[in-house]
Image (cartoon, grey):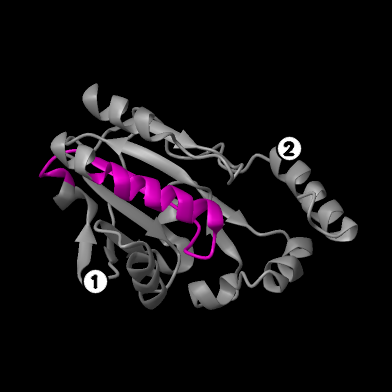
Amino acid sequence: MSSLPEEDAQIVGASFEKLHSSHIGESAIAVGQIAPDFTLPGASGKTVNLHSKLNEGPVVLNFYRGGWCPFCNLELRALQALLPEIKSLGAKLIGISPETPDNSLSTAEKHQLQFDLLSDIGNCIARDYGLIFTVYEEMRPLYLKWGLDVPASNGDASWELPVPATYIIDSKCVVRTAHVDKDYTRRMEPEQILAALRSL
């Protein structure tokens, strides 16, 4: 943030303070709860049903903001690197964002992702999981100035995003591990994901 103009840095700092003092994400699906089912279109054009995937074994379910988010891109690349180990533990990996299928496909191609990226248009599933966050109005001009056009990516004007979250769900549809953090710069560490899968 030190490289930002002072006025922009003040806006970003104030929005982070507001975010940290908010109750965003506190009602999210938690450990021990049944993971809400869904059927969503994937970047490949196929629809994916969560409970059908769970019939085949555990699922690592990752909610991310979009391919425009640099923190999400780092996480997606880390997950791709982890994919062989996730598969070796008998699990599937699914990513969900509110981006349109075309934009999800662009994200998958850009990072050569070999796992399902699903489009949660309107954040319906993120809402079911208690993960809804709306970009603060004062931040929206900055996002656009930085080339982060959330409405264009999502195909709506809501500026709604999911709180970044990672869930480890067992084959009985029970959430066994949950990492939900309203600070979008922090994500679940790869080794924590593998440890959670090994403990199932």
- The quadrant holding residue 57 is top left
Residue 17, given in percent of the width and then of the height, sits at 77, 42
Residue that mark 1 sits on: 44
Residue 82 among those drawn in magenta: yes
The C terminus: image quadrant: top left
Earlier-in-chain disc, 2 versus 1? 2
Most distant residue in the right direction: 7
Q: Toward the viewer: 110 or 181?
A: 110
Say whether residue 88 is visible. yes
Most distant residue in the left direction: 56
The amino acid on which the numbered mark 1 sits, given as a three-letter code, is: Ser
In magenta, the rendered stretch is 54-83
Residue that mark 2 sits on: 21
Q: Please tell me how crowded label 2 is: few (under 14), some (14-19), or many (20+) other residues with Cα within 10 Å.
A: few
Q: Toward the viewer: 37 or 197?
A: 197
> Which SS class for mark 2?
loop
